[in-house]
Image (cartoon, grey):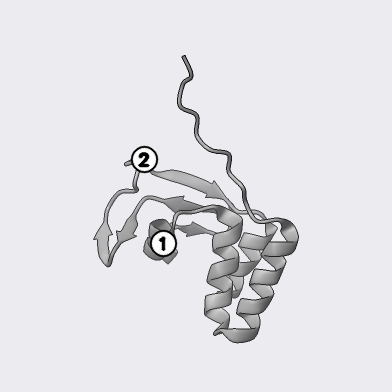
Amino acid sequence: MATWQRPPIEPFTKAEVEQIITAITERSDPQVANMVEFWMFTGMRTSEIFALRWPNVDLNSSSVLVAEANVRGTHKDKTKTNVSRDVKLNSMALGAIQRQ
């Protein structure tokens, strides 16, 4: 008897990410480009990105605390899974949030 398996994740290739970021940088406000770059390199959910606040960003430790969500315009004081987590930022995500 077969069990259900989660479908494989197929993220963008590095070249695709670079194309997306370049296109947004050329066509959008720099703050939008920074957000998209940050988003691409953190893997955060849309609702988590929209709820992220500066007090949850720790530039010294290169991490963000993901503890809230914004779903369809409604602020929620917890994430989808009801579990807060620290997201360690790679150099691309850190650069984007520093430019912001």
Residue farthest front in this picture = 1
Asked if one can make out residue 97 in the rendered structure from this viewpoint, the answer is no
Asked where in the image residue 71 lies, by quadrant, the reply is: bottom left
Quadrant in which the C terminus appears: bottom right
**Residue 9: percent from the left, percent from the top?**
58, 43
Q: Position of residue 70 (x, y in %)?
A: 32, 61
Give the CA distance from mark 1 to mark 2. 15 Å
Q: Return the residue nearer the eye: 9 or 97.
A: 9
Q: Residue at x 55, y 68 (%)?
A: 36
Q: Is residue 28 above or below residue 1?
A: below
**Helix, strand or loop under label 1:** loop
Mark 1 vs 2, N-terminal side: 1
Measured along the vertical axis of the image, is residue 21 above or below residue 48?
below
The image quadrant of residue 27 is bottom right
Identify the residue at image location x=45%, y=27%. Answer: 4
Give the x, y percent position of residue 49.
Answer: 44, 61
Position of residue 8 measured from the top left corner of the image (x, y, whole percent): 58, 39
Residue under label 1, please give it. 52
Question: Which amino acid type corresponds to the residue marked 2 in the rendered image?
Answer: Val
Find the residue positioned furthest to the top: 1
Q: Residue at x 45, y 51 (%)?
A: 65
Q: Tell me if mark 1 has few (under 14), some (14-19) or many (20+) residues whose alpha carbon lies within 10 angstroms of its own.
A: some
Reading the image, the residue beneath label 2 is 83
- Does 6 sit above or below residue 17? above
> In the picture provided, is 44 more to the left or to the right than 50?
right
Is any atom of residue 68 visible in this view?
Answer: yes
